[in-house]
Amino acid sequence: MNKIKFFANEISPDMEGQHVRVAGWIKSVRDLGKIVFVILTDREGELQITFKKGVVSDELFSKIKKVNLLSAMIVEGVVKKAKTKYGYEIIPEKVEIIPAEAPLPIDVFSGKTELSKRINFRTLDVRNRNIAAIFRLKSLIIKAARDWFYQNGFVEINTPVIGLYVAEGGANVFEVDYFGRKAYLRQSPQLYKQLMAGAFEKVFELGPAFRAEQSYTIRHLTEFLSLDAEIAWIDDIDPLLDVLEKLMIHIVKTVRNEGKIYFELLEKELPQIPDRPFPVMSYEEAVRILKAAKIPLEGKEIPHIGEKYLGDYIKKKYDTEFFFITDFPWEIRPFYTMKYEDSPNPSTPTKSMDLLYKGMEIATGSQREHRFNLLVKQMREKGLTPEKFGYYLEAFKYGMPPHGGFGIGVDRLVMQMLDLSNIREAVLFPRDPERLEP
């Protein structure tokens, strides 16, 4: 017998009489006395295994009557046409069972167990194909993004997670003891990807980023998956908008072409392919709209309720769910952001942008300041000590090209695309201020 394991979607009634090897987890057992129907679920679908007294061995028949739900089962048997919703059944000849304890800690298939408990038993949770669909879609989004970057001349890089410097400034960093030296988990790969844009010209990276923030919202985590890109030889943010538009359209097209099954499982609508160009509003225009709606800012930051309002505004006006906000003031942007003019005024606009999708920021970026003297000056304006940025700052003395880039929150993109109520639904093992396991 062929020992390769068949997935559920690889078997059809046309295979009648063929010996197959299948495996999965027991979803249900229907015991009718002299016949037992077992539904086995694997990552691609479901299979019916039929145990009929007198057809299977007495040993197999006795064994299947004692099995617990969600036990793992490996079956070698014969495909037979049958009047089932699958059009076939499998008559077992050899069965191996890896038992599950009873009762189960979560209700895997009803979806009634609360999210926090489901996360505690994630291995069981994602045996539900509906839950697994979220992560299969996430994998497809990552594949689509990688494909687009490779097709468009980007070089994938991998840079350190532990470093000496704080890229974004502020206190929201995790400090680690690095053999007696003080180091930090990165807030983003910002500093390194800038340096590599100064050599490879177009780079991207997918990896974790960390924010030590006491935030308990449905959209924040202390560890998140960031997709970053950096591009040399730009002279404003238009090339960044162009790249983000093309990248997002490619992702949406890929999802529509290859991920339809995941949306069907989750009973969600497929995302619409956005038209280019995406609408663009300046920060000042956004503030005016929010002021008219009596939605206050958080300092100078646009609050989440403001993002949602702007998302609805853009949807009504342009019938699209993607749009940019540009030209944020210097005081709420990192030290490396390029200003439109060399001024210490905190309200000076910067060559910066955010991409919002369905009323939530999913990407942020800017043109970077590549001129050594101005970069040093901007560090000091932000209260940073240039001498502490050694290798990073040193590189700007040796022909660093004009450049810029962005970072995309992959978890947020998945959350918004599937209209999930909590970002933790889109992360296998989320980290927040209260969760450090599993």
Image (cartoon, helix red, strand yellow):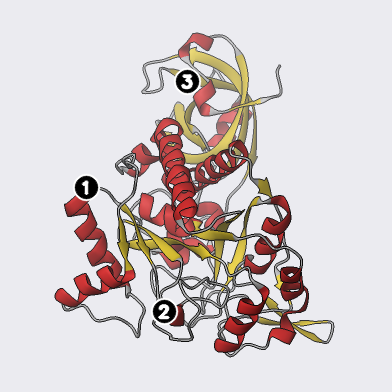
Q: Quadrant of the N terminus?
A: top right
* Label whose residue precedes the other's in the sequence (1 or 2): 1
Q: Is residue 103 visible?
A: no
Image quadrant assignment for residue 143: top right
Residue at image position (78%, 73%) is 391
Residue at the limit of the structure toward the right, as seen here? 179
Nearest the viewer among 288 and 422 is 288
Q: Disc 1 residue type?
A: Asp
Between the C-alphas of marks 1 and 2, the distance is: 32 Å
Query: On the image, numbered disc 1 is attached to which residue?
Result: 319
Query: Any mark on residue 89, and which?
Result: 3
Q: Is residue 80 visible?
A: yes
Q: Disc 3 residue type?
A: Glu
Q: Disc 2 residue type?
A: Thr
Between the C-alphas of marks 3 and 1, the distance is: 48 Å
Query: On the image, numbered disc 2 is attached to which residue?
Result: 348
Residue at image position (37%, 50%) is 417
Coordinates of residue 101 in the picture (x, y in percent): 57, 54
* Label whose residue precedes the other's in the sequence (3 or 1): 3
- For label 3, count other residues whose C-alpha is less than 10 Å away and answer few (under 14), some (14-19) or many (20+): many
